[in-house]
Image (cartoon, helix red, strand yellow):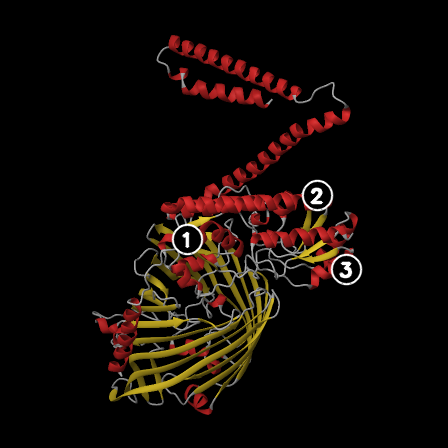
Amino acid sequence: MNAKFLRLLTTILFAGILFMGATPAHAAKIRVVTTLTDLADFARAVGGDLADVRSMATGVEDTHGVPMKPSFVPMLNRADLLVLIGFDCEHAFLPALLEASKNPRIQVNHLGYVDCSKGIIPVDIPKSTDHSEGDVHPWGNPHYTLDPVLAQVAINNIYKAMVATAPEHKAEFTHNRDAYLAKLNAKIAEWEKEVRPIKGTKFVSYHEHWAYFAERFGLKYYGTIEVKPGVDPTPRHIQNLVTGMKDDRVTVVVREPQFPEKAPKQIAEMSGATLIILPIMPGGVPNTETYIKMMDYIIHTMVAAAQTR
Amino acid sequence: MKVMITLITVFMLSLFSTGVFADSLEDRLKALEENQKRQEQTIDEQRKLIEELKTQVKEGQPAAAPAGAAAEQAAPAGEMQQQVEELKEKVDKVVENQTRTQPGIFNPAIGVVGETVFGYRSRKSSETGSDRPGGYDVNQRSVELNIAASVDPFAKAYAVINGAADPVTGEVTLGVEEAALQTTSLPWNLELKAGRFFGEFGRLEYIHDHELPMVNRPLAIDQYIGGESRTDGAQLNWLLPVDHYISLTTGLGTQFGGDNPPNSVGEFRNFSGLNFWSRLSTYFDLTPDISLEPGVSGLWNPHTAAQWDPSAAALPTTNTVSNTKNMFTERERRLLGADLQLSYKPLRNNQFQSVTWGTEVLYSDNRYDVNDVTDPNNPVFLSSRSVGSLGLYSYLTYKFHRQWSAGFLFDYVEDAVDKKAKTYAYSPYITWVTSHWNQIRLQYTYTDHNAESTAAFGLRPDNAVYIQWAWIIGAHSHGWQQR
C-alpha cells in the first residue's frame, strides 16, 4: 500500500511538471482583464488591435455580485493589466481572485493594477462605515461610469496604463483614445439635449447606482428601494417610500435587471410612477453591447418614461 | 472672522518658529519686528487681492443692463461660484473620509466572529458519541478573532484566535486556531504557507465552522480527519500554467485534524512520522450559469506511532479504541478523498437564487497493531491489520431569496477501526441571512446507528434540533476557499 501511495503522489507530481512545460508563449498583444463590461469597452476602444481584452462580467450581473469563478484565475494569471472600477466596487469577488491569480504584475499598487477611480471625486461618502448602515462603500459611491463625463477619467486611466505597459505604441493609443473621446463627447452633447426637457424629473431605483448620472443630467435622485445597500426593502420602508414619492411627485421607478421585480413593481403601482428597467453596464439588457449603446438606451428610456407623465 | 483666526494662527506659528529662539532679547525683538513687517505686507497683498476680485465680480454684473439680461449675465458667475462651492464640499468630504481612516492605516484588518449553537438531543452523550451533553444545550462554539495584514512586499500573515468553552466545566480557553505566513510573490505560480493553518484536503475540511453550509461538520470528516483539517506544518500550492484552472497542493505537518490531541513526540521523530497530504482540483464552466468543481485528495502518515508516546500513561483516545478484549493502536494513517461541487448560479441574479450540490467520499485505510489486553498490565501483540472503511456526505442547498436558503444533508460513515459499525444521519436545514454579517440556521438531525455500532460503542438512534446563530463584526473578507 505504501508503494501504491508513493506511486500516486509521484504520478501527480510528474503530471504537474508536464503541464508546466505546456506554458503557452506570451502573445504580443497587451492582455487586459476588466472586472466589468463598460471598462472592457473602454479598453477595447483605447487598445484597438494591440490589446486582447476580456471581462469577468458579461453585463447581466450585479456590479457587486460577479461570481467568483475559478475559470477567471488562469485569465488573471496571464494578464498584463487588471482594470477595475475601484472605490471598493469589486470587494465581494476581486481580492480573493487576485490572491488566487498568483500574478504579481496586477497586484494592488503595481503597474498592472489599473484603478479607474483615480481622479474621481466620489459622492455619497458614508459618515460611518459601521455595518448598521448596511453594506456601505467606505470610499464613496462607485457607480461613476454611469456619468459619461466621469467615464472619460476612467478612459484616461486605461490609456495611461496602456502607454506605461507598451510605450512604443503610444501614438496608436493616443489616436484611439482621442477618436473615442471625440465620439463620446458628441454623444454627451446629444444626450444632454435630449434630457433637457425632463430636467428635474425625480426618480427612485433599487440600488444606489444613479447618483452621478442624476447629477450630470439634472435629474433628482429621490432614494432607493433597498433599505440600505445590500438590505432588501421591508413593508414599512416601501410604505414610507411610496408616501414620500406621492408627496414629492416622484414619477419614475428604475429597476436594475439584477434585482427582483416584485418590490419595484409594487412601488410603481402604489405611487403611480412609471416603472422602467435600466442596465448598469453594457450587455445588461439586449442591444446595449457597448457603453455608448447602453447610455443611448438609458437616456431614451428615461426620457420616454418621464414624458409619459 | 476666519481671516482673523488665520492671521493669529500664522502669527503664533511664526512666533514659535523664529524670534523666540533668538539668543538675546534684542535679537528677539528684531525678529518680531521683521515678522510683523512681513505679516503687514502679507495683509496688504491680500487686501489688494480681495479688492481686485470684488472689482472683477462687479465688472461681470453691469448695473445698467436690463433686468432680464442682468440675470442671464449674472448666471455664469453665480453658476461658477455654485460649482466651486459644490467642488469644495466634495473635496471636504473626501479629505474628511481620508482623515477618518488615517488612525487605523498601519493596523491589520481585524474582525470578530461569534457563533452560538442552541441544541436539543434526545439521548445522553454516551449514546450519541458527542462531546456535548444530551438534552438541552447552549454551546458558545467559538469566538474567533481574525487578524490579517501584509508582512512585507513578499508575504502576508493572518491569525485566528479562538475562544471556546469546555462542555463540562464551562471554562473558556483561548487557542490559536490558525497563525500562518503566506507568500505573495513566489515565481512559477507557487504559493507557500507555513505555520498553523487548515491544510487543503477535500472540500469542507478547511472551512471554519461558522462558514459551513450546515450546523455541524459532516460525520465522515469528524471520523477520518478529526474535525477541521488543522495542522502545524507547511503547504505549497501550485497553479498550473495552463488556460484551464488546475490547482495542485501538497504539504506536510506534525498533526492533521483540529480535534486530534496535541502530539506527544517522544524523544525523536523520524521524517516518516509526519503527515503528508496533497490535493488536486479543477473547475469547469458547463454553461455560464452551471459549474462543476471536482477534486481528489490524499493524506498519509507512514508511521503514526511517532504521533504519541507509548510510554505515556494516557493514550490518545482517537488513536486507540478498545474493541472487546483487543486494543487497536494506529500505526499508519491513510486516507483518500474525492469530492465534487455542482452549482447553478444564474449570472443575473445569483445573489437571490442558486442551487449547490456538494458531495465528498472518503476512504480510510489505516493500519493498526492489534493487542490482546485481557490483562491490561501485560498486552500481547496479536497481529497488524488494515481496516478499509468508507464515509461520505452529500448536501443540496437551494437559495431562493437574498436572505433565505434551505437544504438537506445526508451523512454515512463507517467506523475507522470497526468498519461494520455504521452511522447514518439525515439533516434538513434552513438558513436566514439577515445581512453579510448575521445568520441564523435551524437544523433537524436524525442520527441512526446499526446494530454493530450499538454493540461495539453503545450508540443509539437519536433526534436533535439545533439553532445556530453566527455573527461577524469588523473586517471580513470573501476568501477564495469559501467561494
Amino acid on which disc 1 is placed? Leu
Marks 1 and 3 sit apart, C-alpha to C-alpha, by 50 Å
Looking at the image, which residue sits at the far bottom? B451
Q: Which residue is mark 2?
A: A196
Q: Identify the residue at horizontal 57%, vertical 47% (top origin).
A: A144
Q: Quadrant of residue B371?
A: bottom left
Which mark identifies residue A269? 3
Can you identify the residue that label 1 sits on? A50
Amino acid carrying mark 3 in the image: Glu
Q: Earlier in the sequence, mark 3 or mark 2?
A: 2
> Crowding near pointer 2: few (<14 within 10 Å), some, many (20+)?
few
* Relative depth, front residue between B240 and B25: B240
**Dot 3 lies on which element?**
helix
Taking the image as drawn, is residue A139 in sight?
no
Q: CA distance from mark 1 to mark 2?
A: 39 Å
Which label's residue is closer to the chain start, 1 or 2? 1
* Chain hosting mark 3: A
